[in-house]
Each structure stands twice: as C-alpha cells, then as structure tokens.
Amino acid sequence: MNFELKIAKAVAFAACFIPLGLLAWDGYTGNLGANPIEVVTRSTGAWTLIFLLITLAVTPLRKLSGWNGLIKFRRMLGLFAFFYVCLHFTTYIWLDQFFDFAAIVKDVAKRPFITVGFASFVLLIPLAVTSTGGMVRRLANTGSNCTA
Amino acid sequence: MLIKKPSDIKSSEITDKETYLNRRQFMAASAAAAGALALPGFFAALSPAYAGEKLPGAQKSPLSTAEPVNSLKDITAYNNFYEFGTDKYSPAVNAKTLKPRPWTVAVEGEIEKPKLYDIDELKKLSPLEERIYRLRCVEGWSMVIPWVGFPLSALIKRVEPTAKAKYLEFTTLYDPKQMPGLRSRVLDWPYLEGLRIDEAGHPLTILGVGLYGEVLPNQNGAPIRLVVPWKYGFKSIKSIVRIRFVEQQPVNSWMKSAPHEYGFYSNVNPQVDHPRWSQARERRIGEFLKRETLMFNGYADQVAQLYAGMDLKKFF
C-alpha cells in the first residue's frame, strides 16, 4: 500500500469516528436531552444506516466516476456500519433493556422495526466475519459473494 | 469603526423583543426544520422556557408525592404536543407562537350555569394548590411534575351539572396560525379528550395553570390544561378552550385515530399491554434503569374504586 493511500485511509478511519465522538461529547456535556438513552439508540441506528448506504454507494460511484481507488475504502466503511450497529445493539440490550432477555424477545416479536433491525444485524454478521484478509483469500474463487 | 448615533438606527432595524428573547429557539427551529438527526449541539440550543409570571401563594397539598421532582429543563424540553410538531423536542422550539393571552374557556352543555370564562377568572375560582404528581406517558416514559392548579371539582360545583351530564368533553385550541403542527393530519383536529363525571370530580383531577411556581410554559399546555395523574399522559389535554358536559361518552382523539390501541379510560395498567409494546415498565426521565409501572400510576388507593367490577382489559 503506497504512502498516500495509507494517509487517506487513516484520515477516513478517523473521520468515521466523528459521529461517535460528537455523541460522546454531547453525553459528557449533558446535552443529550431529557431521554439520553433514546437519543443514543436513535443516533447509533441512524449512523449504521448512513454508513451502510455509503458502503453500498461505493460501487455505483466508482463506475460513474471511474475512480477505482474508491474500492479500497469499501471494507472499512462496511465495517464501520457494523461497528455502529454493534453500538446500537449494545445500547438497546444494555442501557434500554438492561439484559432483560424475556422482555427483549417479546419486544423483537412485538415491534416490527425491532424485528427488521434485529434481522439486519444478524445479516451483517457474516459480512463482518468474512471481511478479514484471511477469509477473503479463502473465499476467493469459490463463487461466494461474501468478499469485500 | 463608526459607532452609530442612536438616531442613525431606524426603529425598523431593531430586532423585535420576541425574536431577540427567542433567538436560541429560532436557531434551533431552523435546525429542527432541517431534520437535525441528534446532531451535536442541537440540545444545547434549546434553552428551557423563558421565565414566566410567578404564581405565588400555591398551597401545599397532601395529595402530592414525595418522590424527587424532575428538573424544569426536562419538563419543559421533552413534550408530546403534536400541534407543535410530532417529536418530543419540537414543541419547546415551536410553541413560542402560541398566545396564551387573551384566553377564554367556554363551559357549556348539560349544566345550569354555562359561561364563557376568562382565564384570569378561572384562576381565581379556587385557591391555587401545588400538586406534585407522577405523569406516565403511554409511550413508556414518566416524570414527576410540580403542577400548580385547582381541583376540577370546584368548577363542576360552580356550573351545576344536570342529571343528564354523565361525561365531560375537553377541546384544545385549534388555530393554524399559532400551531404549525396542525398542517399534519396525524390526528383529527382539534384535539379532544373526555372523562366520566366521577373521574372529573375526583380530588386528584386538577386544572393545571402552572408548574414550578410559575405560569405554564407554552409547550406544557398554556394557559390551562387538565392533569389526571392515574391515566396515560395523552388524557391530560393541553391548552383547553372548551369544556362541555355531555350525556354520551366522548370519542377522544387518540381513540378515534387507533381504537384498538388507545381507549377512552386509558388508566395506567402494567397488566394491559399496548398492542405494539409492553406497559409493564417505564423509563423515569433522569433515571438510568427502567422501573416497574404501577397500577393506576401508583394512585390505586385513591382511584381503584371508580373501576370496581370493570373489565380493565376490555375498557382500556
């Protein structure tokens, strides 16, 4: 990997932490409103979706702009989507429901948006797991789509 | 730098007092309009309600709870008031266009003494009391609020209901010029609520005119609202313009919009779930962990007898 790419990736990496940083800052300064857990849950969920859309936009953008270098950022962006969904999920399980698993199961069944969210989280797991260099090599030429 | 002499500045250039006092709300409103997704600094822009007129002399009441009271900041910045936006942060920003003065409340229907009351007249109807009540929203959060008000029973006594009066029907102001949220058809406006006459006359039921010793901020339902602490918060209708005594059970707005989800009685009941979520627990604003929801919001001793023999799953 050449030097310029390393810098670009480092900058992008840092930039992807900004939403979390701002949320943490607001939490520290007491600026998350009356129901901070609701705001943190909504924020981390929204940023998951945003990163997911950015990741999916890489390929069409690459085709439109002709800039093939974009592909080198896709794995990182996708993993950040997974990072934010993990934060979102942890916030829900821990801060919102405090590990009350009976209530959680009931919630997943009762609230359609939680059912969909939970299903999306489950679907993202194999994508994250198969994103490492080793996994990419093992899955190469198998015809599997699970390679970044 | 040329410092202008006062006569150089046209009076038309002076920011009007309303806008100046509400400049933070104005900026936050722009952010809200742009669909701020919990962007940093958004909440810092929402200052709590500007200091209102004091309501001195409110007597303490044995009906108040001793639980810790929520902060003025939380009470005035987290409100469901769909006439000013459908999220809980918009009313604090948008409700500045509500004009709580002059204000009248039409009391009419099956009564001997119908009258159009001026708000100042209503506030003097009965000695003002401080009532510190729990408020439990149907959504699953709750607060403890130090209301200032007087018992609704004092008004009922004054107007002399006839034998036909079985229910009270309350109506909120409907004025698209003051309430931007009315453009949304999320509810069938104007907002309507109702109580059985015995619920209305219960000692706990008050007409609220203030909180924290001052007049109600706009986003909390200025200048006069209902507070029925043993029912879900949407029954505590805000900014009342009409109270009608009727024979038939009124169709309250939320029941009209989704009758399988919201009923007329809407008593706080951890054993009866909302179709889409459990009502067994609640988040007390300011607390970290959720807490158990209490039957009738903890007022069972005072109100359970109103519903003796009633199937509360059917009459939810």
Image: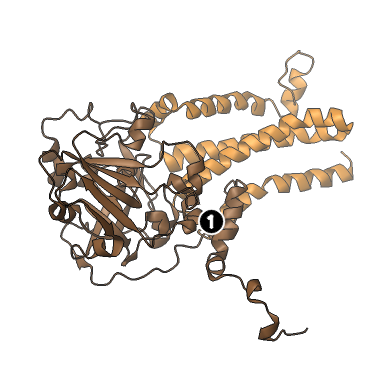
Chain colours: A orange, B brown
The answer to whether residue B14 is left or right of residue A108 is right
Q: What's the amino acid at mark 1?
A: Phe
Q: Decide if residue B300 is in sight here.
A: no
Q: Quadrant of the C terminus of chain A?
A: top right
Q: Name the residue that disc number 1 marks.
A: B43
Q: Secondary structure at mark 1?
A: helix
**Residue B1 position within the rendered picture, expressed as x and y whole percent measured from the top left:** 78, 83
- Image position of B156 with respect to B7: above or below: above
The answer to whether residue A123 is left or right of residue B132 is right
The answer to whether residue B66 is left or right of residue B101 is left
Q: Quadrant of the N terminus of chain A?
A: top right
- Image position of B158 with respect to A101: above or below: below
**Residue name at image x 32 percent, y 45 percent:** B171
**Residue name at image x 21 percent, y 33 percent:** B248
Nearer-the-camera pick, B110 or B40: B110
Nearer-the-camera pick, A122 or B173: B173
Q: Decide if residue B201 is in sight here.
A: yes
Nearer-the-camera pick, B35 or A35: B35
Number of other residues with Cα within 10 Å of mark 1, as a class: few under 14, some 14 to 19, many 20 or more: some
Residue that sits furthest to the top in the current view: A143
Q: How many marks?
A: 1
**Residue A47 position within the rendered picture, expressed as x and y whole percent measured from the top left:** 62, 40
**Residue A68 position within the rendered picture, expressed as x and y whole percent measured from the top left:** 87, 31
Nearer-the-camera pick, B175 or A132: B175
Q: Residue B12 is drawn in which quadrant?
A: bottom right
